[in-house]
Image (cartoon, grey):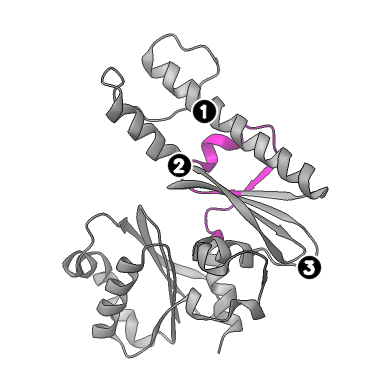
Amino acid sequence: MYLIGDIGNTEIKVCLVDNNNKIFKKIIFSNRNISLSKLKFNLKKLDKYLSKVEKILFCSVVPKSFQLIKKYLKMKTKIRCIEIKQLNLSSIIKIKVNYNQVGSDRLVNAISLLNNINNFIIIDLGTATTFDVLVKNIYKGGIIAPGIKISLNTLSEKASLIPKIDLKNVKKVIGADTTTAVRSGFLWGYAGLIDNIVKLIKKETRKSFKVVITGGFSKLFKNSIKTNVIIDKDITFKGLIKILKIIK
């Protein structure tokens, strides 16, 4: 049995994986103001399984949160808690950028798609909107744009007449009121951003790609963009599982 986790800026996701590489328990909770007491509350459902865990692997973009989880798990099990940047990933994937400046979750996503056949663009609509380019098993780099949720919250906070708005699909571009105008701006604005960046990547590389989209807003944008995409919300976990099968 394996314990894997994805520590993002907004959420922490932890999974138990059985010996057939199937996720059988998933816990998701906020990374805001995280503490040992909050970890104990959120992870207590895993305690009864920890004695059976053989490996623990996390990807993290928040070092302080990883160190806290590492400290918590050290009190519960003798199994070493590893963050993927501690591993020699060059034996798994060729990385053509500054290794220390690429989020470990983005590398894990790329590793999950290695297949020696296809080129991939991975779009993650998370805290940031990221694009990662994988060409014949080589991680070429990517693009980072502002996250949808952060941009929406900032707009509400900075513009006194714009309330907090949840994004929904809108058919018309021209909004009839503030809410529909903001929804239109974000839906069609980000749809245009996604399509244009994918187009520019193809033009620059002169290659074709399969496009995989993940993150909380992936379903909303799948039908709003012109680009044909595959939704995979578990892409990070699949990458962690693949790495676990390789490392000793």
Q: Which residue is mark 2?
A: 147
Asked whether 149 falls inside the magenta stretch, the response is: no
Q: Label 1 near label 3: C-beta < 8 Å?
A: no
The residue segment tinted magenta is 213-235
Q: Does any portion of residue 131 appear in the rendered image?
A: no
Q: Nearest to the eye among marks 2 and 3: give it.
A: 2
The residue lying at 67 percent from left, 44 percent from top is: 229
Q: Quadrant of residue 91?
A: bottom right
Q: The disc labelled 1 sits on which kind of residue?
A: Leu
Within 10 Å of the Cα at label 1, are there few (<14), some (14-19), or many (20+) other Cα atoms? Answer: many
Q: Earlier in the sequence, mark 3 or mark 1?
A: 3
Please give the name of the residue rendered at 38% of the width and 18% of the height, measured from the top-left corner: 179
Percent coordinates x, y for residue 8 in the rendering: 40, 58
Where residue 128 sits: x, y (%)? 46, 47
Name the residue tied to disc 1: 187
Q: Quadrant of the C terminus?
A: bottom right
| Quadrant location of the N terminus in the rendered image | bottom left
Q: Does residue 15 sit above or below 179 in this rendering?
A: below
